[in-house]
Image (spheres, rainbow, N blue to C red):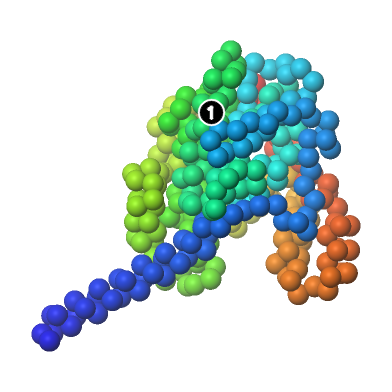
């Protein structure tokens, strides 16, 4: 073989190996369901005396929440982050209901109530948010539509607001793009240089799965969609770090920001609640090594209310913005 032929073969083999590695990482991140963890307690509508109405949009399922007779002329579309769907945010949903809003929470593909073998990718969250907005417009034609999302849900809310008209957007701890989000996660398992090399392959996978929308930039949409937008972030967030967040890279006359001091990835919670949640997540990571009795005792006696205690200041900032 000619030297150039050998070199070309080596390069192609290297590209193939990198693509396989990127594909494996993508599958690990997204190609699985995200359902309730049977070890944990999740608050429900009954815990807050909320009335509910089940909804179904194709394979997507969710719930409309209300407290008494809603007094506000707006519907809050709540978009969940990575995890077991909107059930992980019932405390926040209750907050909006208590302030007179009707809340529409739809689980994304592969999450909790909704069908699907897996999450598939980040843009599925955007598609879910769009479906929820369309449903809200059709069933509440006389109400304004606000969209609120956390983490993946914040990304989805910002991108969906560029596809469908909403009156206001609140994005909490929102990452800026799928590739940078995958990079952030992969860098915890491989070196940052290796994760950086894989980024073009993740971009290609998103393109193949979702077309041009697969690599949508929430920063671009937040800057250009003109919708009144509030970005909320914790200054101690080590999941969506400054270099990967919408908060630190987005500016515009339509954009307001609130940086929650001392907060990590869940800035709507108190500092103490975030510490309790971090403790819970640490225990979950080692649960398989715990004895059955120890596991049952710990997770059944854990103070879930303390781990979801809301920060009144942060929630008030959001409520004031939505008025």
The vertical placement of 39 against 193, above or below, is: above
Res. 123 visible in picture: yes
Image: 230 above or below 87: above
Q: Residue furthest left?
A: 2
Q: Position of residue 231 (x, y in %)?
A: 56, 38
SS for dot 1 = helix
Q: Quadrant of the N terminus?
A: bottom left
Which residue does the image show at 51% across and 58% down from the upper left?
31
- Judge whether 36 appears above or below 91 on screen: below
Is residue 248 visible to the viewer in this orientation of the structure? no
* Lateral position of residue 12 relative to residue 187, left or right: left
Image quadrant assignment for residue 219: top left
Image quarter of residue 61:
top right
Residue 37 at x, y percent in the picture: 72, 56
- The spot of residue 194 in percent (x, y) is 42, 71
Find residue 52 and report its image quarter. Answer: top right
Q: Nearer the viewer, residue 311 or 199?
A: 199
Q: Is residue 322 left or right of residue 255?
A: right
Which residue occupies 42% across, 36% down? Answer: 221
Q: Quadrant of the C terminus?
A: top right
State the residue at coordinates (70%, 67%): 285
Foreground pick, 93 / 24: 24
Residue farthest to the bottom? 1
Q: Residue at x 48, y 58 (%)?
A: 182
Percent of width and height locating residue 164: 46, 27
So how many labels did they put on this image? 1
* Label 1 Cα crowd, 10 Å radius (few <14 / some 14-19 / many 20+): many
Q: Which residue is mark 1?
A: 133
């Amino acid at each position: 073989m000619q030297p150039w032929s050998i070199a070309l073969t080596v390069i192609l083999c290297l590209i193939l190996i990198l693509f396989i590695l990127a594909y494996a990482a993508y599958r690990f991140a997204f190609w699985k369901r995200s359902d309730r963890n049977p070890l944990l307690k999740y608050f429900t509508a009954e815990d807050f005396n909320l009335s509910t109405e089940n909804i179904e949009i194709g394979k997507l399922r969710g719930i409309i929440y209300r407290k008494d007779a809603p007094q506000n002329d707006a519907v809050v579309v709540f978009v969940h982050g990575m995890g077991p769907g909107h059930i992980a945010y019932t405390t926040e949903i209750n907050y909006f209901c208590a302030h007179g809003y009707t809340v529409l929470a739809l689980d994304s593909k592969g999450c909790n109530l909704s069908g699907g073998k897996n999450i598939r990718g980040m843009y599925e969250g955007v598609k879910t948010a769009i479906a929820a907005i369309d449903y809200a417009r059709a069933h509440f034609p006389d109400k304004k539509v606000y969209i609120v999302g956390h983490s993946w849900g914040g990304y989805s809310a910002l991108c969906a607001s560029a596809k469908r008209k909403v009156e206001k957007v609140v994005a909490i701890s929102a990452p800026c793009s799928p590739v940078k989000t995958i990079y952030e996660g992969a860098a915890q398992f491989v070196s940052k240089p290796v994760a950086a090399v894989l980024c073009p392959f993740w971009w290609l996978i998103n393109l193949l799965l979702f077309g041009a929308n697969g690599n949508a930039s929430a920063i671009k949409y937040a800057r250009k969609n003109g919708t009144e937008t509030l970005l909320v972030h914790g200054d101690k967030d080590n999941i969506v770090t400054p270099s990967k967040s919408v908060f630190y890279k987005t500016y515009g006359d339509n954009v307001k920001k609130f940086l929650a001091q001392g907060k990590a990835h869940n800035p709507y919670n108190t500092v103490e609640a975030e510490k309790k949640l971090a403790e819970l997540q640490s225990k979950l990571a080692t649960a398989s090594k715990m004895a059955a009795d120890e596991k049952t005792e710990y997770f059944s006696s854990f103070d879930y209310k303390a781990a979801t205690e809301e920060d009144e200041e942060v929630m008030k900032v959001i409520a004031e913005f939505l008025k």
